[in-house]
Amino acid sequence: MYKQIFFDFDSTLVHAETLDLLADLAGVGPEVRRLTEASMNGELPIEAVFEKKLAMISPSLAMIDRLHKIHPPFVEGVEELVATLHRLGKEVFILTSNFGMIVAPYAEELGIRSECVIANELFHDDEGNYLGMNASNALAHTGGKRIMIDRYIQDKQKAVMIGDSVTDLACQPSVRTFIGFAGVVAREAVRAQADVFVEEASALALLPHLLTKQERESL
Ligand SMILES: [Mg+2]
């Protein structure tokens, strides 16, 4: 049924909003969390807050390194889920407004190739100080995930997107099925519109929605 499976990253694959954790490291956690929640619930457009949040955090390479050492955990079952999908020959993507260098170690652990990580970019100077983000990347804007997913989808009928927030829901018209995953956080705006809404804490609860009966029996 599905050939291309797109996952959001924060609060879908990992049990955290990693930019909020970076904000904690930078000492601006509460202010940044307020902006994150407002944009995830659809109260504020991403472009109104994203660059501002990053400027507040000013994530140096050293801070990103500390975040990777803290290593917020995968959502329960994610490693097994992705390994199973790979074993069945599915193309697994990460589609996130987060940044390639933040997501990369997780993708590697899951065996997801860098070509299958669709993310934004951060810029640093030679000393590793934060210079800025790529504000012209579609992922920095409302509806950006849909623009990016459209560049990768080969056949809408064989594509599925899984995510927790309204920015993920924007991909719904591009895919056969949009699955709202509420294993970390349940958002009512997503529940209201998702084709499927999964509330179990384990990502393995997604499997019955991703595989045919025949694929499940072949495992
Ligand atoms: Mg998310």
Image (cartoon, rainbow, N blue to C red):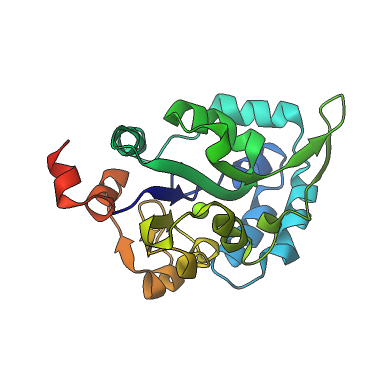
**Residue 67 appears left or right of 88:** right
* Count of numbered circles in the view: 0
**Residue 122 appears left or right of 155:** right
In the rendered image, the vertical position of residue 69 relative to residue 84, given as above or below = above
Front position in the image: 198 or 26: 198
Front position in the image: 205 or 82: 82
Q: Answer with the quarter of the image where residue 86 lies.
A: top left
In the rendered image, the vertical position of residue 15 relative to residue 200, given as above or below = above
Quadrant holding the C terminus: top left
Looking at the image, can residue 38 be seen?
Answer: yes
Measuring from the top left, give residue 48's x and y in whole percent. 74, 66
Measuring from the top left, give residue 137's x and y in whole percent. 73, 53
- Residue at image x 80%, y 49%? 55
- Residue at image x 51%, y 32%? 113
In the rendered image, the vertical position of residue 198 relative to residue 133, given as above or below = below
Measuring from the top left, give residue 203's x and y in whole percent. 32, 45
Quadrant holding the N terminus: bottom left
Question: Which residue appears farthest toward the left when viewing the image?
Answer: 217
Measuring from the top left, give residue 66's x and y in whole percent. 64, 27
Looking at the image, can residue 16 be seen?
Answer: no
- Residue at image x 72%, y 39%? 26
Front position in the image: 183 or 80: 80
Q: Answer with the quarter of the image where residue 59 lies.
A: top right
- Residue at image x 43%, y 42%? 92
